[in-house]
Image (cartoon, grey):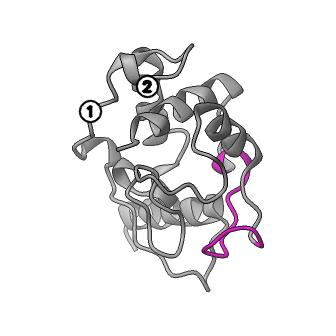
């Protein structure tokens, strides 16, 4: 196997581990270059909650597709991944009321497998090592996806 193949397999394994997935989980492979995909426009500043800035949304976008590894389970642009993580841009919130503060709390806490609609756990911070301030930025981006 080539080094590129080993690297891709390692990246996929990390992504599945972060989502709580395993060999029994059904998943769609995440693209190799998540940042290259077209990104939706952030919500206008007037529609953001108090204390949330457009700069936080932009930082959250980078984290969502990078260190936060959110795209692995929730897909590019928050469209969801069948059998892993739900869509984030629709009006249906499975584990909270969809407010900014609730999104922050959900990312910090995660979702236990027995509470998850897909049966797949979401570890606290998605299994990533992002800081609490970075969680707030990711939450700002997720909040901005609302239709």
Residue 22 rendering spot, x and y as whole percentages:
63, 77
* Disc sitting over residue 57 in the figure: 2
- CA neighbours of label 2 inside 10 A, class few (<14), some (14 to 19), many (20+): many
**In the image, residue 2 above or below residue 66:** below
- CA neighbours of label 1 inside 10 A, class few (<14), some (14 to 19), many (20+): few
Give the residue drawn at x 52%, y 18%: 52
**In the image, residue 43 above or below residue 126:** above
**In the image, residue 95 above or below residue 23:** above
Residue 50 rendering spot, x and y as whole percentages:
55, 15
Magenta range: 114-126
Give the residue drawn at x 25%, y 43%: 36
Residue pointed to by mark 1: 41
Magenta-drawn stretch contains 118: yes
Q: Main secondary structure of the magenta part?
A: loop
Q: Is residue 34 left or right of residue 125?
A: left
Q: Earlier in the sequence, mark 1 or mark 2?
A: 1
Observer-nearest of 119 and 65: 119
Q: Is residue 133 left or right of residue 57?
A: right
Res 117 → quadrant: bottom right
**How many discs mark residues in the rendered view?**
2
Tell me the element at label 2: helix
Q: For the C terminus, which image quadrant?
A: top left
Tell me the element at label 1: loop
Give the residue drawn at x 72%, y 51%: 110
Res 125 → quadrant: top right
| Spatial CA span between label 1 and label 2 | 10 Å
Residue 15 rendering spot, x and y as whole percentages:
55, 60
């Amino acid at each position: 196997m080539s080094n590129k193949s080993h690297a891709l397999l390692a990246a996929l394994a990390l992504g599945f581990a972060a989502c709580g997935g395993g060999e029994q989980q059904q998943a769609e492979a995440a693209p190799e270059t998540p940042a290259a995909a077209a990104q939706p426009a952030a919500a206008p500043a007037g529609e953001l909650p108090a204390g949330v800035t457009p700069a936080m949304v932009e930082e959250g976008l980078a984290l969502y597709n990078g260190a936060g590894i959110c795209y692995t389970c929730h897909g590019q642009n928050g469209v969801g991944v069948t059998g892993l993580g739900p869509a984030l841009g629709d009006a249906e919130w499975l584990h909270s009321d969809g407010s900014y503060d609730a999104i922050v709390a959900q990312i910090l806490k995660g979702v236990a497998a027995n509470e998850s609609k897909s049966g797949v756990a979401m570890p606290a911070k998605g299994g990533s090592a992002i800081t609490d301030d970075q969680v707030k930025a990711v939450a700002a981006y997720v909040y901005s996806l609302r239709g």
